[in-house]
Amino acid sequence: MLWKSTEDKSLLREWNWLQSIAVFMVISNVFMPFFAGLLALWVLLSRGWRSLVTPINIAYFWLSVWMILTTLTAFDIGTAAGGLANFLPYFLLAATTSYIVRTPAQFIHLLWLFVLSSVLVSSFGIFQAILDRPDWIFPKVIFNSYPIPMGFSGDRRIQSFFGHFNETAIYLLMILPIAFHFAVGKVKSITKFQRAVAVIALTLGIGVLIMTGSRNAWGLAMIGAVFLAIYYRQWKLVAGFAVVTLAIAWAVFGSRLGLGGEGLRSLLPQGFVNRLISTVDPQMGDFASTADRLNAWQFAISLISQHPIQGWGLRNFTKVATFMNFDLRGLPHEHNLFLAIAVGSGVPALIAFVGILGKTIWLASRKLVAIETEGMIVIVAISVILFLLSCCLDLVLYEPRISMLLWYLLGSMEGVATMKQYIVPLHGGNS
């Protein structure tokens, strides 16, 4: 069944609402965040704020208060107030999701719906690659706030529904471990049809991930594969991935270090090799992205050292750079989520943010929860970790659909992991 009922009939409306968002979330970065926001507000107003009280949700609340306070002292208060929209609504989204998703069956089904939804992203990406007419523009008013070219970019990259190739790549990076766990039959409670959908999602997703040309996602996909192999205790696969990774590194970078590898390098796609080499080779055009990031990170660290407690205000990075006549070389943000939070709201906000996510992942590591969710909660923790690792080199959290996916995963993890400790009566009320 595409839609699955909930054991708690008093939450049936909210659960069906959440399932609908999970399926159609990817098609619009304008309308779907609006519907998700309505659901979060509905739960808050109809059930009362006390229904959302758990230690993690309390931490979200106090982090929100801190971010609001730092906004009042921001370099540009208006810009910082707008930056709150990248965090506070999603904290509420996570809190309300933890209230709706309470059972392992709900958790597993919601994850399958995310996998199903990813087929739309991958299929559209494959269609773009086959059509390959970048001069044809998909009207932005239908799905997104930006136009979508119907083909490869000038450097042969595909972006699907998203506004940038890296956004598509990180979205798929979070989905693929979940799809893999379904596809290889680790979840016995799903139907053959659901498993078949997961196989399709996995196959198409890998193809589009490769075509995004995201070096960050490529590397993290290998790391994710190692995480999965370790979790499955497939030590031969772990060794195999290590050998393959070392072989690729030798082939790509060996000649630059005088270690050979030219023969193996000739067996790899030239475009793939060039993308990797350009990360460290100043003679190649794509190296500019590496140099620009290093330049932005140095400036971000300088700003943090000047205002370590209150920061400069969320999304104020470029404004401060302009004021100080610092050349960011066209970068619109820090290209690092952790630096962005510290620059925007200070080191205390960064510590709280990392602490909340770390606590959620720790709750997911408990053996009983892993058994009840057929291992899926551990796989979701891996997806979240891969996202956080990607945040060291890029900042895609400002894409609403990626933020929605992240906090839906975190909220549902918390809901299942804490259901026996903090569950409250469901009689509603605004008290």
Image: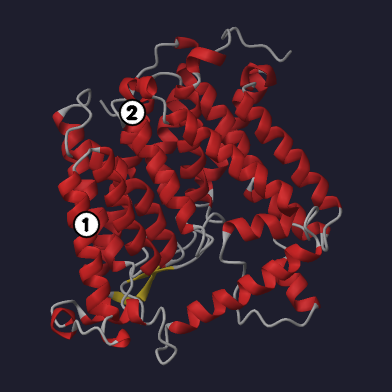
Dot 1: within a 10 Å radius of its alpha carbon, few (fewer than 14), some, or many (20 or more) residues?
Answer: some
Seen from the viewer's position, the closer of residues 331 and 222 is 222
Which mark is on residue 214?
A: none
Dot 2: within a 10 Å radius of its alpha carbon, few (fewer than 14), some, or many (20 or more) residues?
Answer: many
| Residue sitting at the far right | 73
Q: Is residue 21 visible?
A: yes
In percent of width and height, residue 116 lies at: 29, 41
In percent of width and height, residue 370 lies at: 35, 26
In the image, residue 216 sits, relative to residue 279, either above or below, namely above
- 357 relative to 165 in the view: left or right: right
Q: Which residue is depicted at the point 75% across and 71% down?
A: 319
Which mark is on residue 241?
A: 1
Q: Within the image, what quadrant is residue 160 found in?
A: bottom left
Q: Spatial distance from mark 2 to mark 1, Cα to Cα?
A: 28 Å
Q: Which color scheme did the rendering employ for the protein?
A: secondary structure
Residue to which mark 2 is pinned: 108
Seen from the viewer's position, the closer of residues 289 and 21 is 289
Q: Quadrant of the C terminus?
A: top right
In percent of width and height, residue 81 lies at: 76, 52
Q: Secondary structure at mark 1?
A: helix
Residue type, label 1: Phe
Q: Quadrant of the N terminus?
A: top left
- 290 relative to 104 in the view: left or right: right
In percent of width and height, residue 144 lies at: 48, 58
Seen from the viewer's position, the closer of residues 255 and 98 is 255
Q: Secondary structure at mark 2?
A: helix
Q: Within the image, what quadrant is residue 381 found in?
A: top left
Disc 2 and disc 1 in contact, CB within 8 angstroms: no
Q: Which residue is depicted at the point 38% across and 82% down?
A: 278
